[in-house]
Amino acid sequence: MQGARPAPEAPGGDHGRRSTGSSTMMDVLFYVLGSLFVLIGFACLVLVVFQMPGTWIMLIIATLVHLADVFWIMPGMGGSPSPAWGWWAIAIGCAFALVGEVIEFAAGALGAKAGGGSKRAAWGAILGGFLGAIIGSIMLPIIGTILGAICGCFLGAFLGETTGKDPRTAAESVKPAIGATIGRVLGTTCKVLIGVVVWVVLSTGLLSAGLA
């Protein structure tokens, strides 16, 4: 007498259960990664306020996550790269970060010009802000970086006006120097806002991949 045939396997079978399990694991993984990225990205924004390359650090972390996704996470789970973000998103983020750097350095020069300063004052504001940030970082890390950049911007514009072929008096040079200082502060503010945009876009991408 022939034995009873085994019941047919449900569509998908073990493969379907593994796929569902892998999908759930990936959802949890990307949600955890997204949550961590939100916290780390916020810390990077704080670094930007203190004249440090926080946006660039954030983009480096995003690049490492994307590489891990493409070459390790998804292949290990038998899937294709996640929709968190692609190289285009990271490239656009780098472009935004570069624009932020240009705005920050140029803002001091534009502020000096707005205050009636000469080209020497504008260049002095750029160089003074850069050197001031370095010197301030050495003397008093983090806080000194901010103070050094602001003071350096002021002194650079001031010295640019009071020296050269047609120097101005100290009283005449104060206004361009103040303009350079205000411009530098506004430039840093714009840089932070650009960093916030990059942070929100990248964080949303990872969290969306986890909740998809």
Image (spheres, rainbow, N blue to C red):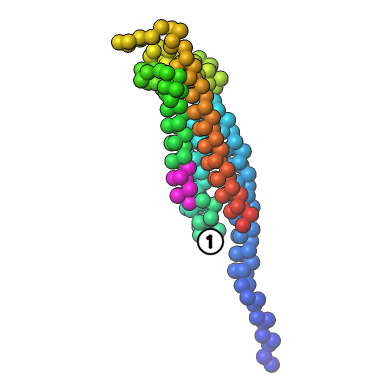
Q: Amino acid at mark 1?
A: Gly
Residue pointed to by mark 1: 78
- Give the x, y percent position of residue 89: 48, 48
Looking at the picture, does residue 173 appear above or below residue 59?
Answer: above
Looking at the image, residue 208 sits to the left or right of residue 122; the answer is: right
- Give the x, y percent position of residue 151: 49, 15
Magenta residues (range): 86-93
Residue at screen point 49% across, 16% down: 178
Q: Is 92 one of the magenta-colored residues?
A: yes
Residue at screen point 51% across, 32% down: 191
Q: State which quarter of the image contains the N terminus.
A: bottom right
Identify the image quadrant of residue 99.
top left
Residue 80 in sight in this render? yes
**What kind of secondary structure does the magenta stretch mostly adopt?**
helix
Q: Nearer the viewer, residue 64 or 43?
A: 43
Looking at the picture, does residue 143 appear above or below residue 195?
Answer: above
Residue at screen point 53% across, 60% down: 79
